[in-house]
Amino acid sequence: MLILSVNDDVNTCWEQVRLKTTAMQVQTTIRIESTESKCDVVRATPSSTETILFVEDEAFVRNVTNEVLRSAGYVVLACGNAAEALAAYNEHRGEVDLLLTDVILPGETGRTLARNLRLQNSTLSVLFISGYSEQLEALKTESADYLTKPFSTEVLLRKIKELLAHRQVWVGKQASLRQAAGRA
């Protein structure tokens, strides 16, 4: 169950999503069921350079968040489960800057997905999202970055910007160390 405050952005996205899904709306509580589970690549603008692999099993949340990220200028690989996300990551190897994933997913969890992707790319930034407090408690003990559902667009974009800025500093330091080692 997802609780959203109704605003123009959600209404606009709702109109787009409504054609593809079956929905039940009670006041501001919306339950979405969908058979869709394809991984969609949405390119924001030709100048986008940062790519987010976004994994969310609830279609409505995935579509709204996908639109928010795309509108903010990110290239988005939006997937409905961990298996699709792994396939998208492998198809776009070297392009993904941040994994934004729900903790609880059908099949493999978001935490397992993050662990497997970080084995391939140790500089990959990861941001977990969840509405389940017990899942968040485990993330707190791991010092992982996370947001509690529901969250505002502003909070999401600020956290992503922060994580990507930190990643750029880290990648830059690694490149400097490699150059220095090559001169020695």
Image (tube, rainbow, N blue to C red):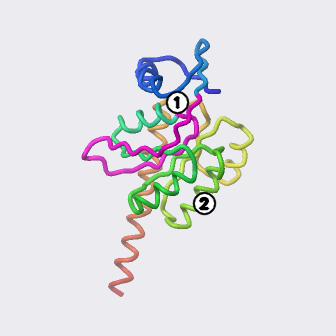
Q: Residue at x 52, y 46 (%)?
A: 100
* Residue 41 lies within the magenta run: yes
For this rendering, which residue is in front, 148 or 96?
96
Q: Nearer the viewer, residue 40 or 165?
A: 40
| Residue 145 place in picture, x, y as percent | 58, 48
Q: Which residue is mark 1?
A: 60
> In the image as oriented, which residue stretches furthest toward the bottom?
184
What residue occupies the far right of the structure in this picture? 134
Q: Secondary structure at mark 2?
A: helix
Residue numbers of the magenta segment: 33-61
Furthest-top residue in this view: 27
The x, y position of residue 14, in whole percent, is 46, 22
Quadrant including the N terminus = top right
Which residue corresponds to the image point at 33% horizontal and 44% vertical from the top-left? 43
Counting residues from the start of the chain, the first of labels 2 and 1 encountered is: 1
Tags 2 and 1 touching, CB below 8 Å:
no
| Residue 103 falls in image quadrant | top right
Quarter assignment of residue 178: bottom left
Other residues around mark 1 within 10 Å, as few (<14) / some (14–19) / many (≥20):
many
Q: Specify the amino acid type for callout 2.
A: Arg
Read off the residue under disc 2.
115
